[in-house]
């Protein structure tokens, strides 16, 4: 599995442009060798997931790049960090961790990345052109970028994302190549109950089911008659990329590479057709909850980060009421700025919403530590990761259920009983 | 019983007890980077420790931060003593590549078809420099 580097790439890997650029190029080239990529290809932009603190090693790595004089070669947005630098919310990291997390965020800014601090960069103005090659990290952003925008990226893990951004190149393999973007299986919603599909909480459930069945293979969702809206595709992508290794999916008639199922299947018969039934979605929905009973301690929404539209929906659902439970709404500065412009931020906070910017409650300790705590969410991704990362058990419900539960102080479901 | 596997990442040869995961795992959110304990409550091996084992992975899922967790496990001395993958996962292996660039001596990673994994569960295994998996006779 030999990778052929150009003379220039070879020279950079040997240190022509400094130690930082050399380390980045070596990581890209080594990954290319590992994945059987014959060469590297230029990328137009990067989204970087590496600035979230998981331990001191990541900080030391970023600082080594800075010391080595590295700079990003392409426009690069940053995913969430471990700190809310806007001051909207406070995390509970111990002093050492807080310092290291801050140093890490500063190191990525020193490398020339933009302080976007969001897992929904595609709603913060970073929308690469259909067909362009990019290097994105953060599983939900990768799935959205490939599927909804039609730009081409593999699932770049922490450290390879920044390495590609500095090198301006990525290994030529996987989803960068047209032949690997063809759908292999069909995920058909034609027989799924209409009432379920019309419910706003259906897309994270469908995403979770899709991800578990897909693993890392590419499929096409059929039977979707109306565009569900970008926020619903965002929720589907995030859930699918949590329960499976989904980097790309198509929705026939909706996403850019799938004018219809036959086209995106490449004219070939699907290897498998999954007819989604009511029983399957009911089971998938039940799988997003790990708690049972009437206890509820907090509500968290915004994974991926809430858009301006989602905040408007939240505000309308709360109305003039006050929330009785801690309610975390995670977002990026793009939506926070819009809330401030609309004069909605203070009102939401007065009603009891804790706005969390730059980070989220599942990646950094923010919620009260509770034994047997129960968290309600409308996010398939939060439902997947909250138990392992926060210790809270989860209850899954629609945005309306999240609001009604936070007002009542106990789980209340507004969606049809059959789907709760 | 010896079996030669293909080397994915040359690292430090090691030995330990074989731990064969029965379901794919997301390292981020699924493995505690400080301890090496499987933290995903939905994983059938929740609570099992991967540190110091020769770890057999049928597949990986989920977050692209798996590499950060893997590098932190290496840095914290809680990494597996060897990693055996059904197929290479660029995200996870990048944790080893980056650790090597930082001079932290990651373990070896090799590729072996998952059909051969089960027989290694619970065995004392040495992962040799040439990619051979050696088990002591029972």
Image (spheres, helix red, strand yellow):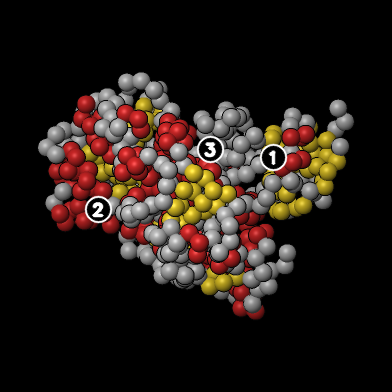
- Residues marked 2 and 1, same chain: no
The residue most toward the left is: A320
- Residue that numbered label 2 is attached to: A308
Where residue A76 appears, as percent x and y from the top left, is 42, 64
Which of the 4 image quarters holds residue A294? top left
Where residue A389 appears, as percent x and y from the top left, is 45, 36
Where residue A179 appears, as percent x and y from the top left, is 59, 65
- Label at residue B30: 3
- Residue that numbered label 1 is attached to: B56
Say which residue appears at 83% left-offset and 39% top-offset: B134
The secondary element bearing badge 1 is classed as strand
- Would residue A352 appear left or right of B5 to someone viewing this image? left
Where residue A312 appears, as percent x and y from the top left, is 20, 48
Q: Chain of mark 2?
A: A
Q: Quadrant of the N terminus of chain A?
A: bottom right
- Measured in 3D between alpha carbons, the distance from the residue under mark 3 to the one under mark 1, in whole angstroms, is 15 Å
Which of the 4 image quarters holds residue A192? top left
Q: Chain of mark 3?
A: B
Instruction: Please tell me which of labels 3 and 1 falls first in the chain.
Output: 3
């Amino acid at each position: 599995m030999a990778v052929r580097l150009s003379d220039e790439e070879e020279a950079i890997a040997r240190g022509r442009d400094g130690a930082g650029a050399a380390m980045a190029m070596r990581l890209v080239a080594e990954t290319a060798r590992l994945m059987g990529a014959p060469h590297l290809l230029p990328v137009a932009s990067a989204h970087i997931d590496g600035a979230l603190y998981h331990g001191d090693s990541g900080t030391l790595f970023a600082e080594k790049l800075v010391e080595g004089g590295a700079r990003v070669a392409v426009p690069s947005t940053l995913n969430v960090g471990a700190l809310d630098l806007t001051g909207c919310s406070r995390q509970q990291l111990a002093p050492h961790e807080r310092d290291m997390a801050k140093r890490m965020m500063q190191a990525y800014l020193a490398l020339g990345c933009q302080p976007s601090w969001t897992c929904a960069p595609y709603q913060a103005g970073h929308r690469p052109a259909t067909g362009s090659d990019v290097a994105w990290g953060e599983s939900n952003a990768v799935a959205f970028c490939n599927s909804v925008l039609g730009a081409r990226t593999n699932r770049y893990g922490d450290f390879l994302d920044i390495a590609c951004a500095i090198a301006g190149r990525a290994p030529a393999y996987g989803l960068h190549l047209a032949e690997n973007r063809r759908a292999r299986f069909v995920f058909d919603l034609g027989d799924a109950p209409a009432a379920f599909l019309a419910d706003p909480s259906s897309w994270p459930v469908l995403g979770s089911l899709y991800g578990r069945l897909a693993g890392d293979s590419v499929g096409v969702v059929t039977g979707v008659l109306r565009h569900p809206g970008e926020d619903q595709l965002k929720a589907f992508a995030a859930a699918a990329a949590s329960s499976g290794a989904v980097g790309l999916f198509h929705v026939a008639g909706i996403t850019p590479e799938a004018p219809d199922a036959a086209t995106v299947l490449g004219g070939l018969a699907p290897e498998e057709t999954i007819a989604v039934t009511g029983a399957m979605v009911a089971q998938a929905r039940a799988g997003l909850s790990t708690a049972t009973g009437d206890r509820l301690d907090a509500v968290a929404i915004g994974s991926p980060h809430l858009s301006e539209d989602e905040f408007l929906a939240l505000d309308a659902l709360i109305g003039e009421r006050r929330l009785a439970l801690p309610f975390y709404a995670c977002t990026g500065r793009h939506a926070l700025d819009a809330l401030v412009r609309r004069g909605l931020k203070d009102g939401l906070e007065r009603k009891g919403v804790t706005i969390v910017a730059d980070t989220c409650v599942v990646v950094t300790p923010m919620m009260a530590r509770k034994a047997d705590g129960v968290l309600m969410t409308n996010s398939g991704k939060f439902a997947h990761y909250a138990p392992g990362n926060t210790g809270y058990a989860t209850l899954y419900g629609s945005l309306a259920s999240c609001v009604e539960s936070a007002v009542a102080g106990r789980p209340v479901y507004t969606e049809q009983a059959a789907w709760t | 019983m010896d079996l030669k596997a293909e080397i994915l990442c040359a690292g430090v040869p090691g030995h330990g007890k074989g731990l064969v995961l029965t379901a794919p795992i997301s390292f981020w959110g699924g493995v505690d980077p400080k301890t090496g304990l499987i933290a995903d409550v939905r994983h059938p091996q929740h609570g099992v420790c991967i540190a110091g084992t020769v770890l057999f992975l049928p597949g990986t899922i989920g977050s692209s931060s798996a590499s950060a967790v893997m590098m932190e496990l290496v840095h914290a001395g809680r990494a597996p003593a060897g990693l055996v993958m059904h197929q290479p996962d660029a995200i996870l292996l990048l944790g080893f590549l980056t650790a090597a660039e930082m001079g932290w001596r990651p373990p070896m990673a090799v590729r072996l078809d998952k059909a051969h994994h089960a027989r290694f569960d619970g065995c004392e295994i040495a992962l040799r420099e040439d990619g051979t998996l050696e088990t002591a006779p029972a």
